[in-house]
Image: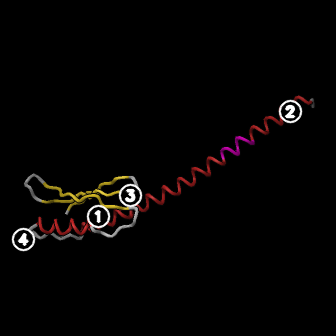
Amino acid sequence: MKISEVLICIALFILVSIATAECFIVFNRNYKNTVTKIIDVQKIITFDCMLRERVEKIEMPYWKNKERIYEKERLALLELNTEKDFAIVSVEKVINMEDELVGVVIVWKYKDDVFETKERL
């Protein structure tokens, strides 16, 4: 073998090694981001499910004043004990064509993201 062939082979080996190392570094960086995103999504889904279950438990008999029940439950939802990353911003009512209360919309934050949970009563 000539010396020029050896130098070209060494150069190619070094380039392939650098590319492989760079791919490995990028993979590790993205893997850590993926794991944190998965944990965040699990927390978001769990909190949303907890809110929906809480709204499902609200009973509104037709003979009682729905506005009073809504106000009481709205205050209870706003004062709900949550983790430090979660914050309930607002609780709004959903009204149908006949001006009847049929559901609630809960606006909440997780870190910097804002979410809406809409649930029928």
Residue under label 2:
7
Could you tell whether 27 is left or right of 16 in the image?
A: left
From the image, state whether disc 3 or disc 1 is nearer to you.
3
Measure the C-alpha gap from mark 2 to mark 3. Answer: 56 Å
Q: Which mark is residue 110?
A: 3
Distance between mark 1 and mark 2 Cα atoms: 67 Å
Q: Quadrant of the N terminus?
A: top right
The answer to whether marks 1 and 2 mark residues whose Cβ atoms lie closer than 8 Å is: no
In the image, residue 103 lies at what x, y percent? 19, 59
Counting residues from the start of the chain, the first of labels 3 and 4 encountered is 4
Q: Around disc 3, counting alpha carbons within 10 Å, would you say few (fewer than 14), some (14 to 19), or many (20 or more)?
A: some
Please report the bounds of the magenta region as a residue range.
Answer: 17-23
Position of residue 7 in the picture relative to residue 121 (left or right)? right
Q: CA distance from mark 3 to mark 1?
A: 16 Å
Tell me the crowding category of disc 4: few under 14, some 14 to 19, or many 20 or more residues within 10 angstroms, Cα based: few
What is the three-letter code of the residue carrying label 1?
Arg
Q: Determine which residue is flagged by label 1.
A: 52
Label 4 belongs to which residue? 63
Q: Secondary structure at mark 3?
A: strand
- Residue 107 drawn in magenta: no
Quadrant position of the C terminus in the picture = bottom left
* Residue ID at (40%, 56%): 111
Majority SS type along the magenta span: helix
Q: Residue at x 70, y 44 (%)?
A: 20
Q: Amino acid at mark 2?
A: Leu
Q: Is residue 68 above or below residue 96?
A: below
**Relative side of 73 to 82, left or right:** left
